[in-house]
Image (cartoon, helix red, strand yellow):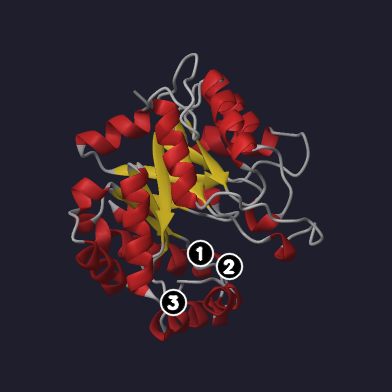
């Protein structure tokens, strides 16, 4: 059983962290970050060309982490592969020892560094989840028998801040019905968003296996960009004012301290209604130990 699955099923406070494979073949930076954080997180999400920016395949990066005794969670997106490639890739991941998947749609190609790329999107996220579930039970997506099954712990994503909450709740139920066993959320800055979402789902957080997304606010500029461009993110004016006030000091450390204080407050506010947290540091990985210490 994976460390992640064991932690979530036993009710332990669980922490995952997102890392991006390199745009190139040099894994040293990713491995250094993972080494620094390995004692405070249960597993590392490895993104699948996040923001449609081409990077190393997360399965390869995950295998490198496994070789160093660390546990990966491989992102699987519908954007780039048809059902044949998706299933063969998952079988290959299993053969390399990877046991955790998190399945999602992926960012559209036109926003990335290869805007002429064609999105595939042969299967919806819930259909890929169903395919992974079938692989765990000895069959492919078409019902054909496998010579050796898999043992994936299958995760997906949800967005408690979605504008159309009813549609998000319906989609999350579709993923659960397809076989999703845990969820990581979009970043949350307002506790009422999560409460509303879980209430509408009518599923206890302990049964949902929910890891709440945390992105530290690095600057007012970053916050304004996320509010304008990232679906489901809503950073309230009071938090923007706190970061703006810190920025006026012209002291970078003051900004970091205020950002970590806000993130730690969010973790403390939401800890009782989720199973743990998914940290997306976006270059601030070195500050994550301090963040978790503040939030304890």
Q: Residue at x 60, y 54 (%)?
A: 283
- Residue 262, by quadrant, is bottom left
Q: Position of residue 185 (x, y in %)?
A: 40, 57
Kind of element beneath mark 2: helix
Of circles 3 and 2, which is in front?
Answer: 3
- To which residue does mark 1 refer? 256
Q: Is residue 40 visible?
A: no
**Residue 90 image position (x, y, % from top left):** 55, 31
Q: Is residue 221 visible?
A: yes
The residue drawn where x is 26% and y is 43% is: 13
Secondary structure beneath label 1? helix
* Residue 26, image quadrant: top right
Q: Provide the residue designation for mark 3.
A: 234
Mark sitting earlier along the chain (3/1):
3
Q: In the image, is residue 4 above or below residue 49?
A: above
Give the distance between the C-alpha atoms of the residues marked 3 and 2, in whole angstroms: 24 Å
Q: Mark 1 and mark 2 in contact (Cβ < 8 Å)?
A: yes
Indicate the position of residue 236 as horizontal and vertical percent values. Answer: 41, 81
Among numbered discs 3 and 2, the one appearing first in the sequence: 3
Query: What x and y, as percent, mark residue 196?
Result: 25, 71
Q: 109 or 251: nearer the eye?
A: 109
Residue 252 is tagged as 2
150 or 60, which lies in front?
150
For the N terminus, give its image quadrant: top left
169 or 15: nearer the viewer:
169
- Badge 3: how crowded within 10 Å, few (<14), some, or many (20+)? some
């Amino acid at each position: 059983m994976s460390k992640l699955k064991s932690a979530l099923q036993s009710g332990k406070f669980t922490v995952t962290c997102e890392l991006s494979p390199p745009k190139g073949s040099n894994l040293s930076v990713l491995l250094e970050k993972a080494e620094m954080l390995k004692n405070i997180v249960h597993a590392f999400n490895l993104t699948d060309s996040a923001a449609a920016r081409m990077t190393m395949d997360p399965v390869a990066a995950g295998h490198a982490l496994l070789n160093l005794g660390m546990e990966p969670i491989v992102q699987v997106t519908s954007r780039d592969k048809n059902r044949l490639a998706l299933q063969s890739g998952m079988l290959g991941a299993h053969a390399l020892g990877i046991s955790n998947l998190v399945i999602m749609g992926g960012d559209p190609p036109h926003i990335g560094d290869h805007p002429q790329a064609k999105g595939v999107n042969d299967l919806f996220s819930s259909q890929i989840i169903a395919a992974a579930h079938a692989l765990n039970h000895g069959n492919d997506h078409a019902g054909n028998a496998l010579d050796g099954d898999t043992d994936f712990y299958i995760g997906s994503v949800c967005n408690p801040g979605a504008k159309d909450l009813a549609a998000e709740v319906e989609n999350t139920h579709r993923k659960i019905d397809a076989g999703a066993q845990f969820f990581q959320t979009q970043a949350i800055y307002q506790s009422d968003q999560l409460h509303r979402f879980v209430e509408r789902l009518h599923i206890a957080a302990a049964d949902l296996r929910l890891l709440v997304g945390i992105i530290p606010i690095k600057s007012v500029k970053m916050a304004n960009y996320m509010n304008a461009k990232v679906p489901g993110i809503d950073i309230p004016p009071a938090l923007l004012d706190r970061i703006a006030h810190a920025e006026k000091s012209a002291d970078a450390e003051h900004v970091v301290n205020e950002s970590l204080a806000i993130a730690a407050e969010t973790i403390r506010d939401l800890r009782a209604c989720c199973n743990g947290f998914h940290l997306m540091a976006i270059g601030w990985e070195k500050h994550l130990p301090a963040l978790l210490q503040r939030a304890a």
